Image (cartoon, rainbow, N blue to C red):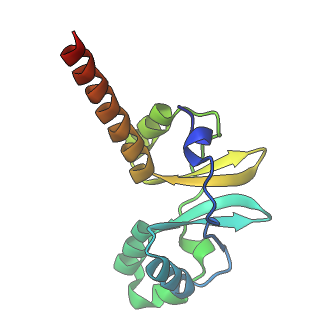
Amino acid sequence: MTIARLIEGRGAAIITCVADTSVREAVTLLAEKRIGALPVLADGKVAGIFSERDVIYQLQEHGPAMLDKRVGEVMTAPAVTVQPETGVLTALALMTRRRIRHLPVVRDGAMIGFVSIGDLVKYRIDRIEAEAEAMRAYIQAA
């Protein structure tokens, strides 16, 4: 299964911000939308990722004054991305190895999707459960 098939049919718009967005605004967006990260765009391309982890690290280093900074100053950059043709298990391994939880899906430099480790783990669990059910059905039919 590829990332393209996983994100196929998603109708919801991807919530993003730009590098000039204040950290305060981005934190509000994360909280209101109940999400863990925002792709940061510059000229329609992914410039970085702004996540809950960035907030924590900046709070520890700069205190509440970090809320007045711009996302471009504190985001994780460059963003680790995948292409639509990337396999789900390959993406999951990449996220595990790099210790990241979100991946922009990029085609020809433009972001076409955004997946979380939760999306990939859910796919994997669903597959394992389907395989186990198929095995049970096979054994019972034998």
Q: Is residue 61 left or right of residue 38?
A: left
Of residues 64 and 110, the one nearer the viewer is 110
Instruction: Let me know if residue 103 appears in the view.
Output: yes
Q: Is residue 63 left or right of residue 69?
A: left
Q: Residue at x 59, y 34 (%)?
A: 86
Q: Quadrant of residue 70?
A: bottom right
Of residues 48 and 35, the one nearer the viewer is 35
Q: Quadrant of residue 4?
A: top right
Across and down, in percent, residue 6 comes to 55, 43
Q: Quadrant of residue 87?
A: top right
Image: 115 above or below 53: above
Q: Check the image and name the residue furthest to the front.
A: 141
Q: Check the image and name the residue furthest to the top.
A: 142
Q: Residue at x 64, y 81 (%)?
A: 21
Across and down, in percent, residue 117 comes to 42, 50
Of residues 81 and 141, the one nearer the viewer is 141
Q: Residue at x 64, y 33 (%)?
A: 85
Image: 8 above or below 93: below
Q: Residue at x 26, y 27 (%)?
A: 132
Q: Is residue 107 left or right of residue 14?
A: right
Count of labels shown? 0
Across and down, in percent, residue 25 comes to 56, 86
Of residues 23 and 125, the one nearer the viewer is 125
Across and down, in percent, residue 9 comes to 63, 51
Q: Is residue 16 left or right of residue 121?
A: right
Instruction: Let me know if residue 100 appears in the view.
Output: no
Point out the image quarter for the C terminus: top left
